[in-house]
Amino acid sequence: MAEDLVLDTAIRDWVLIPLSVVMVLIGVLRYFVSKLMRTTQLPDAKIIKEGQLIIRARNLRAAANFIPPKAFRARKIYYTNEENGLLHVPKGQAQNPQAQMLSDPNMAMDMMKKNLSMIIPQTLTFAWVNFFFSGFVAAKIPFPLTQRFRSMLQNGIDLSTVDVSYVSSRSWYFLNLFGLRGLFSLILGEENATDDTQRMMQMSGFGFDPSKSLGAEKDGLDIVHHEWVLPKFEQRAEAVLRKRLA
């Protein structure tokens, strides 16, 4: 049977609150350091043009049924023509994002700076937590949990008799590390550089491949089934009024 523990208020004052405050301050500091380390680059006109083209093609697919069939066919040919369509990318002109990044030293340097600004603070903070706060039971969740949460909430505590709702100091560090995104968005705005989960996903890839996005939009336009819905609006409105008045 799981044991109930009485948490000392000193643990709250000297472990739980300081750890949370330090995690927030480190996140804010990392945000401003990342802004200082970021090099200002002029946006590539070709990339902006391709992005705007993809948005226009998506809008055409979304609102295809609100334009006449002749207008839709003209726009579809304009985008998907195999000879000079805007969404058609010849095989020889497809760009490799990895080769593009390796050819641009500024892009590689920016990515290395971002990774360092994430890895170094996390490593130092985890070493600090592991040295000073290892083995503490820092908090208790006010609702029962299953045994599957034990490894996540009680990292560093090897006691199977403790109830699962108790949280160790090391687990509290990880919960703050991945759970403060909403708070940082409130403090720093939506476009903040403290989303560690997004950065970890970016570390596995090198960038944006415009040829794949253009090809995907071209395939999407090719399979669109067009049906002009405006001539049927009067019949639909009449049917709705008849149901209301009946």
Image: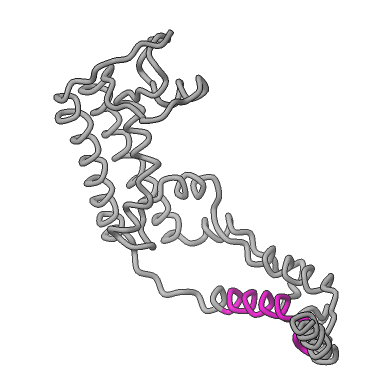
| Quadrant occupied by the C terminus | bottom right
Q: Which residue is more in the foreground, 19 or 149?
A: 149
Magenta stretch bounds: 49-68
Write down the quadrant of residue 215 in the picture.
Answer: bottom right
Q: Does residue 206 appear in the picture of this structure?
A: yes
The spot of residue 205 in percent (x, y) is 55, 49
Q: Position of 102 compared to 62: left or right? A: left
Visual colour scheme: one colour
Q: Which residue is more in the foreground, 42 or 61?
A: 61
The spot of residue 34 in percent (x, y) is 30, 55
Q: Which residue is more in the foreground, 47 or 127?
A: 127
Write down the quadrant of residue 50 in the picture.
Answer: bottom right
Would you place residue 227 above or below residue 32 in this image? Answer: below
Q: Which residue is more in the foreground, 134 or 204?
A: 134
Q: Main secondary structure of the magenta part?
A: helix
Q: Residue at x 36, y 30 (%)?
A: 142
Magenta-drawn stretch contains 238: no
Would you place residue 212 above or below residue 156 in this image? Answer: below
Q: Residue at x 45, y 59 (%)?
A: 107
Number of numbered discs overlaid on the protein picture: 0
Q: Does residue 75 appear in the picture of this structure?
A: no
Write down the quadrant of residue 18 in the picture.
Answer: top left
The spot of residue 1 in percent (x, y) is 43, 8
Task: Name the outermost residue toward the front.
Answer: 246
The spot of residue 29 in percent (x, y) is 23, 51
Magenta-drawn stretch contains 61: yes
Q: Residue at x 79, y 68 (%)?
A: 219
Q: Position of 59 compared to 200: left or right? A: right
Would you place residue 204 above or below residue 13 in this image? Answer: below
Q: Residue at x 15, y 28 (%)?
A: 14
